[in-house]
Amino acid sequence: MALLEVKDIRKTFTQKRKPPHIVLENLSFSVERGQYVSLLGPSGCGKTTLLTMLGGFMSADTGQIYLAGKKVEGPGPDRGFVFQNYALFPWMTVQENILYSLKVQNFNKREREKRLQELLDISHLHGSENKYPIQLSGGMQQRVAVVRALASRPEILLLDEPLGAIDFQMRELLQEELAALVEEAQTTVVMVTHDVNESVYLSDRVIVMSANKGRIIKDMYIDLPRPRSRQSQAFKEYVSELTELVRQAFREGGSYRQADIPARDRGVDNNFVASYNRMHSRYTNVANGRSRAVK
């Protein structure tokens, strides 16, 4: 049995004085345990909507999602979620951020400390564990976010463009680090990306989605050895074929901008970010270790 099963998912967004917009229709696929699967396609094709539903933060209109044989009906510790915008708690140090998910899941102190050391080892964050997010580069902040999501050993890791906010010069290096981290953790991954090169470098499979109703136009297996060379002819051929498929998806029709979707229908991403930003603005001087809220 596959670890993740998506069966006949349909999702629509409604607007005043406009007909409903079908974001996903009759979408089905499965993911085997240990696979790294990327969702690739034009903006507005429903990639992030789908990922949000996999996380249990948004429900489908029809269809079902199963993880390890259990129906997904809400968020749970069996899924780790990493947002594009880092989403670290600014008043917590690196180690406090990593330990947060273990505390809320009632791991005892000994278990938390053991797991922290394991994660610091595989992520090469030793020496930075007492720093605050403001003292870290964007790439290192996102590394901490991934490690935090892995802390409780979730069944699956859900990544929403985890390197999308990283400058180009650092992105390839961080892709290498992410690949090594996921391999070390031996976890299953579903990742949203716009970057064709990134999808080929990281993934076992790339699912290309159309701009129209989020259909799957190609489910491509990447048969390349790891670690991968971006300079190999086979790598370039995968990139070329996927690039043409994404262009085909663009030609199918205009994308549906997230800004056109009512706020109540955009799912956890916007609500989480808004809440997070409100918390962020209430705290100052985190680099100096003070977590006193500003009145």
Image (cartoon, rainbow, N blue to C red):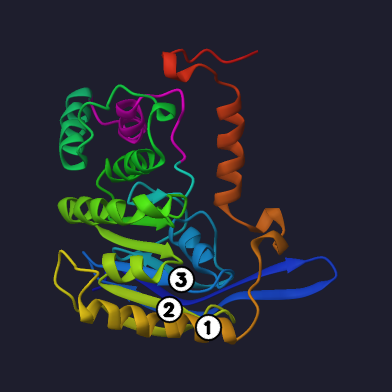
| Most foreground residue, 205 or 101 | 205
Q: Which mark is residue 249?
A: 1
Mark 1 is surrounded, within 10 Å at the Cα level, by few (under 14), some (14 to 19) or many (20 or more) other residues, namely: many
Tell me the quarter of the image containing the C terminus: top right
Q: Is residue 105 left or right of residue 52?
A: left
User: Which of disc 3 and disc 2 is earlier in sequence?
Assistant: 3
Where's residue 261, x and y in %? Answer: 69, 62
Q: What amino acid is found at the position of numbered circle 3 in the picture?
A: Gln
Q: Please tell me which residue is depicted at 19% across the width and 53% down the height of the picture.
A: 180
Mark 2 is surrounded, within 10 Å at the Cα level, by few (under 14), some (14 to 19) or many (20 or more) other residues, namely: many
Residue under numbered circle 3:
64
Query: Label 1's element?
Result: helix
Residue under numbered circle 2:
208
What whole-number distance in Å separates the C-alpha atoms at marks 2 and 3?
21 Å
Q: What amino acid is found at the position of numbered circle 2 in the picture?
A: Val
Query: Label 3's element?
Result: strand
